[in-house]
């Protein structure tokens, strides 16, 4: 999950490590699942990627209908929306 999100946002492991104030090796262990980030790091990762923490830790089931309705509502209210479809991030709404 972390690797996919990072790559979709065109961020290197080193850039992520610098942002989180950890080593590149430590960040790489998060991506491999060899190490789990503490809650403070999870919060920062969620903020960076604009995703719920539950999604990062595998506790979040995405209901497609709910997601589509939330996106429609955000676009209707002229909010910027970034959607990760598993391969690409699609941007629409405000300024798009």
Image: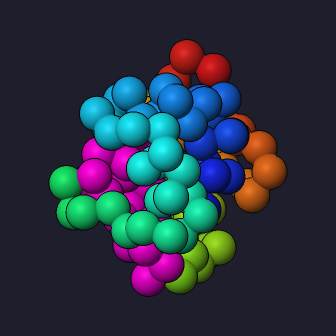
Which residue is outermost to the right?
A: 87
Query: At 60% across and 31% down in the image, what residue appears?
Result: 12
Q: Is residue 7 magenta?
A: no
Q: Quadrant of the C terminus?
A: top right
Residue closer to the observer: 77 or 10: 10
Can you give x and y, in whole percent of width and height, for residue 53 in the image? 35, 64
Is any part of residue 68 visible from this angle?
Answer: yes
Q: Is residue 64 above or below residue 78?
A: below
Taking the magenta stretch, the answer to whether it contains residue 54 is yes
Residue at position x 54%, y 50% in the image: 28
| Image coordinates for residue 64, horizontal then vertical, percent | 65, 73
When asked about the image quadrant of residue 92, the answer is top right
Residue 21 position within the rendered picture, expressed as x and y whole percent measured from the top left: 28, 33
Most common secondary structure along the magenta stretch: helix
Q: Residue furthest top?
A: 95
Q: Is residue 14 above or below residue 39?
A: above
- Residue 50 visible somewhere in the drawing: no
**Number of callouts in the render?**
0
Q: Which residues are magenta?
A: 41-60
User: Looking at the picture, does residue 92 appear above or below residue 65?
Assistant: above
Q: Please state, as top left, top right, bottom left or bottom right, where the N terminus lies in the image.
A: bottom right
Report x, y in % for residue 36: 38, 68
Horizontally, residue 19 falls left or right of residue 5, namely left
Question: Residue at point 43% right, 74% down?
Answer: 57
Nearer to me, 16 or 25: 25
Q: Residue furthest left?
A: 40
Q: Please name the residue shown 49% across and 78% down the image.
A: 58
């Amino acid at each position: 999950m972390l690797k996919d999100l990072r790559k979709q946002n065109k961020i290197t492991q080193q850039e992520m490590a610098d942002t989180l104030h950890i080593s590149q090796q430590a960040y790489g262990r998060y991506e491999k699942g060899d190490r789990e980030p503490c809650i403070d790091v999870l919060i920062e990762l969620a903020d960076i990627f604009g995703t719920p923490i539950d999604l990062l830790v595998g506790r979040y089931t995405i209901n497609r209908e709910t997601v589509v309705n939330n996106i429609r509502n955000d676009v209707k209210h002229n909010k910027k929306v970034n959607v990760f479809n598993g391969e690409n991030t699609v941007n629409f709404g405000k300024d798009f």
